[in-house]
Image (spheres, grey):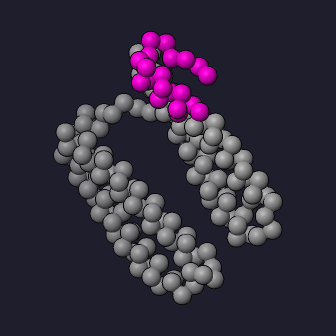
């Protein structure tokens, strides 16, 4: 594995963890792709493809985390792949207001999706529809988490 120049023990261990996890993610991705191809079930292939999309994003995120850590540990002057936390540098009142509107929109979507999932309970064991709506609910919860983090940073 690549070693970091001038890194602390903690940075080196974290870098090793991130890069080894990226390799594990790559192996998992291949297994899901194989499952999607080998399955005689269109539903399983569809679900596996959703997981593959997530695994591809995870793979990229681990690669970006390792790259950003390397940039920081080696004190590189260029902006790392994952930008430094600078939300507080913006025009805070306007940014906070924008973020709050986005949070309201996401919370409204969450309520709509929750209602829709309730309407689909009768078909949750006979179609993929209920599951897909539940997954969108989870994505919406993730979006709210991201926006609440950004709001906290913008308020600093």
- The rendered magenta stretch, by its main secondary structure, is classed as helix
Horizontally, residue 43 falls left or right of residue 116, namely right
Residue at the spot 36% in from the left edge and 50% down from the top edge: 146
Residue 79 in view, yes or no: no
Residue 47 in view, yes or no: yes
Q: Measured along the vertical axis of the image, is residue 150 above or below residue 84?
A: below
Q: How many marks?
A: 0
Residue at the spot 57% in from the left edge and 84% down from the top edge: 123
Image spot of residue 136 (x, y percent): 49, 65
Image spot of residue 129 (x, y percent): 58, 76
Verify whether residue 11 appears in magenta: yes
Residue at the spot 61% in from the left edge and 22% down from the top edge: 1
Residue at the spot 41% in from the left edge and 56% down from the top edge: 142
Image spot of residue 115 (x, y percent): 41, 79
Q: Give the residues drawn in magenta, as a range.
A: 1-20
Verify whether residue 15 appears in magenta: yes
Q: Measured along the vertical axis of the image, is residue 118 above or below residue 97?
A: below
Horizontally, residue 92 falls left or right of residue 64, namely left
Horizontally, residue 51 falls left or right of residue 133, namely right
Give the camera-side residue of 125 and 150. 125
Image spot of residue 29 (x, y percent): 67, 47
Position of the C terminus by quadrant = top left
Give the camera-side residue of 88 and 20. 20
Q: Measured along the vertical axis of the image, is residue 105 above or below residue 81?
A: below
Of all residues, the one furthest to the top in this rendering is: 6
């Amino acid at each position: 594995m690549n070693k970091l120049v001038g890194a602390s023990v903690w940075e080196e261990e974290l870098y090793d963890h991130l890069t080894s996890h990226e390799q594990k993610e790559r192996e998992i991705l291949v297994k899901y792709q194989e499952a999607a191809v080998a399955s005689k079930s269109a539903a399983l292939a569809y679900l596996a493809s959703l997981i593959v999309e997530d695994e591809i994003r995870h793979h990229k995120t681990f690669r970006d985390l390792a790259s950003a850590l390397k940039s920081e540990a080696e004190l590189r002057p260029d902006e790392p792949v994952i930008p430094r936390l600078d939300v507080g540098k913006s025009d805070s009142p306007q940014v906070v207001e924008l973020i709050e509107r986005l949070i309201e929109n996401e919370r409204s979507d969450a309520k709509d999706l929750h209602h829709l999932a309730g309407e689909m309970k009768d078909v949750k064991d006979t179609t993929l529809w209920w599951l897909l709506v539940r997954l969108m609910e989870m994505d919406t919860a993730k979006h709210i988490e991201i926006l609440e983090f950004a709001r906290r940073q913008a308020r600093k």
